[in-house]
Amino acid sequence: MVNSNVTIYTLPCLSDNYAYVVHNSASGTAAVVDVPEAGPLVDKISELNVPVTDIFLTHHHWDHIDGLPDLQAALTGSLSQAPARVIGAKADAHRLPTLDQAVSPGDRLTLCGIEGDIYDVSGHTLGHLALHLPSAKAVFTADSLMAMGCGRLFEGSAAQMWHSLQQLRALPQDTWVYSGHEYTASNMAFTHS
Ligand SMILES: [Fe+2]
């Protein structure tokens, strides 16, 4: 049974990135997944008019984290909210923005009142995390898994990426995948080639 209180908003950012706002109407709070840039997130949060309790960062690449200072400034400034908890990989804490909670694969935590499970999906980078929200039937895979493709292997091996994809494949069949980029057309062109 899917949690009908949860709505996930997909926000195009930069040239082909996605950021996400997870809104839990039961708790009256929201969480953010990745911050390529602040603007689209600030607009959506203003529209929803709910406090953001958590900001989850999937991996250290600039196009997933560089909007964080501006988002934090807007939350505590013009939006008059308390600071949101910033969550990211313990293994990557040295190259992520300052974390309020450093998590490891296998951890379970609560974001905006929703339970989430942490997976290691290394390959694109080492220390890349996926966030699975079982009650919302949602997994945030960022640059590990997109429509019709996976991310480039910048740091990890093909074997690591395959292990990561196998973990994601083992999630329930009705899980929605929320990825970090819109690469569908180019992935389709590649499959044709
Ligand atoms: Fe990336």
Image: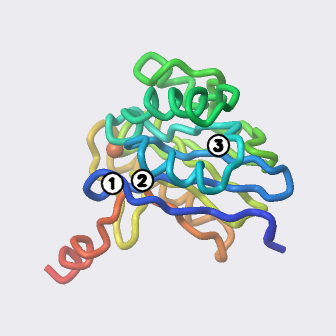
Image coordinates of residue 166 in percent, x first then y, are 52, 60
For label 2, the crowd category at 10 Å Cα-Cα, with few meaning under 14, some 14 to 19 and many 20 or more, is: many
Mark sitting on residue 8: none
Secondary structure type for disc 1: loop
The residue beneath circle 3 is: 118
Where is 121 relative to 107, above or below? below
The residue beneath circle 1 is: 151
Residue drawn where x is 30% and y is 36% of the image: 155
- Ligand 1 within 8 Å, label 1 CB: yes
* Type of amino acid under label 2: Ser
Where is 50 relative to 101, above or below? below
Identify the mark nearer the N-term, 1 or 2.
Answer: 2
The residue beneath circle 2 is: 144
Identify the mark nearer the N-term, 2 or 3.
Answer: 3
Which of these two is toward me, 178 or 82?
A: 82
Where is 72 relative to 174, above or below? above
- Marks 3 and 1: in contact by CB < 8 Å? no
* Type of amino acid under label 1: Gly
- Marks 2 and 1: in contact by CB < 8 Å? yes
